[in-house]
Amino acid sequence: MLKLSTLHTYLNQVLDLPDLHTAILLTPTGQLISYASDPSRSKEDVRSVVGLSGDSFLEVEEQGFATFEIKGKPHLGSIYVLAVNEAQDETQDGWQPLMLLALNFSNGYDQGAVRLKAKALAAHLAKSLSKYRDYLVVPRPPPTSSNISSPTPVR
């Protein structure tokens, strides 16, 4: 069973205040599961990071990660988004990450340290979450074809 308090504890352990200030676990569709952040950060800042992280899903799906600087909100800095998955899961057709892990950090913070922390936490979370793959992954819709006629007659 997944316990939100445990997830929050893991996310909180990754933080390195004040520079690495927010850690977020979200679904590939952009739904917030859990987060930990510097208490001085507003919930609106967290929501902004969740939205931007969810928007990066295509890049994460292609590369396994995404990193970008937040324009227009310099106090937020940059975001590193990583797919939470076990390595063997990625070889399956129709692969989709179990979850996304987003780390929000100041622009001057060492990006190498961010990547290491994200990879370590994602690997740890993947061990627990992979048992729930059938419940967590959203099935892809069947491909549509233009040759299929509508079941409703045209009037």
Image (tube, helix red, strand yellow):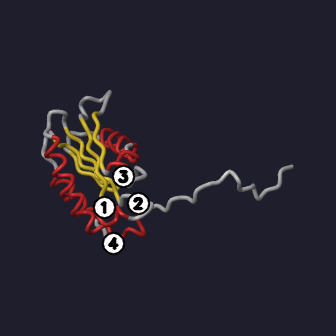
Q: Which residue type does callout 4 highlight? A: Lys
Residue 78 pos. (x, y %) = 25, 37
| Label 3, label 2: how far apart the Cα atoms are | 21 Å
Q: Which of marks 1 and 2 is nearer the N terminus?
A: 1
Q: Is residue 2 left or right of residue 151?
A: left
Find numbered disc 3 in the image and state the secondary structure of the residue it sits on.
strand
For marks 3 and 2 on the same chain, the one whose residue lies earlier in the sequence = 3
- Sequence-first disc among 3 and 4: 3
The residue depicted at 18 percent of the width and 57 percent of the height is 120
- Residue at image position (28%, 66%) is 3
Q: Do the residues labelled 3 and 2 touch (CB within 8 Å)?
A: no
Q: Are marks 1 and 2 in contact (CB under 8 Å)?
A: yes
Mark 1 to mark 2 CA distance (whole Å)? 10 Å
Q: Nearer the viewer, residue 75 or 68?
A: 68
Determine which of the numbered discs, if any, sits on residue 131 in the image.
Answer: 4
* CB under 8 Å between discs 3 and 1: no
Nearer the observer, 117 or 15: 117
* Residue 85: mark: 1
- Tell me the mark number nearer the camera, choosing from 3 and 1: 1
Mark whose residue sits in front, 3 or 4: 4
Disc 2 is placed on an element classified as loop
Say if 15 sits above or below 99 in the image. above
